[in-house]
Amino acid sequence: MKSLFSAFVAPVETELRTVYRTEENAGGQTVRRKIRFFRPDYKFVRNDTESELIVSALNVHIKDNHILKDVNLTIPEKKITCIIGPSGCGKTTLLKTLNRLTDSVEGVKITGKIFINGEDIINSGSEITRIRRKMGLISQRPCPLPMSIFDNVAYGCRIHGIRNRRKLRMIVKHYLDAAGLWDEVKDRLRTPAVRLSIGQQQRLCLARSLAVEPQFILADEATSALDPISSKIIEELFVKLKQNYSIVMVTHTLRQALRIADHVVFMYLGEIIETGSADYVFNNPQHELTKKYLSGAFS
């Protein structure tokens, strides 16, 4: 029986590209190696050229609590958008609503619209698995699946109909490399993922999200549980990945937003108070609440 997702899988002859690398061998001689690998611009699952995310009049109630209040937001393409604001202001709820993770929360009521490339994912009856594939979510604490390193990365690909072992090997290698993890784990791909360090586990979760080729990376305080070195690695990865992905990142650390944000959203008590380029918001805030937050008057 033909796979439900076979329409997304492109012909195998376009999957590889060849490059030549000049390097020294053990004897100090210069050699030219032929390398064939998975093309970074090749997509097994998606072929979208644009990533448009627009939130319109979004309200989220959980039981008697009005969590998000008339949120209107446009996420710029292929930039890092940092959502900042004090604890409890609705940052994580907004991120989870984008990924439809609030659907299963008891007593939740959602109104408004979220458009991905013109499709309203709240009201159109869209299939949730397909929506979540478009939005790779990296949580505060890494949550590797109880399986091997290889199977963690391949898991989502198998769900979306990719069964060919050769394809899976290429995908796993490519996205572990994209997450800066390949050289550290290439000799133990079949060992349990839980044996990795916390920082490595977070990069594995990033590779797992990238492997299904999302349009957006949603990061909910993705570095807060990590040591400074691992945090720096993740930040550097995000800066590289924005060439191909739109990244939406919740952070409590203003220094982090100052380092890597292209665009900033400041939230307070469920509302968006101010939004704009990082340079503009940090250096020329217009709202008094934004000025007080940035000055450290409250956190």
Image (cartoon, grey):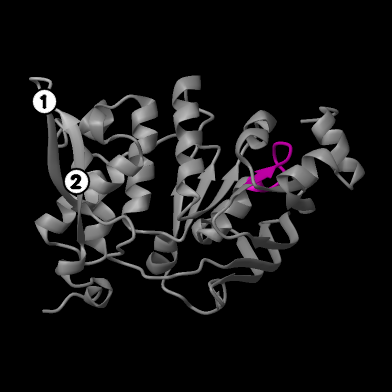
Compared with 177, 72 (above or below) is below
Task: Residue at 89% x, 47% y: name it.
Answer: 286
x, y percent for residue 208: 32, 47
Q: Which residue is mark 1?
A: 29
Secondary element at tag 2: strand
Secondary element at tag 1: loop
Residue type at tag 1? Gln
Is 42 magenta? The answer is: no
Cα separation, mark 2 vs mark 1, equals 16 Å
The answer, for residue 268, to whether it is visible in the render is no
Task: Residue at 75% x, 43% y: name it.
Answer: 279
Which segment is the magenta one?
82-91
Task: Residue at 16% x, 36% y: name it.
Answer: 189
Is 89 magenta? The answer is: yes
x, y percent for residue 1: 11, 79
Q: Which residue is mark 2?
A: 20
Judging depth in this view, the residue of 249 and 110 nearest the camera is 249
Judging depth in this view, the residue of 185 and 42 nearest the camera is 42
x, y percent for residue 39: 27, 57
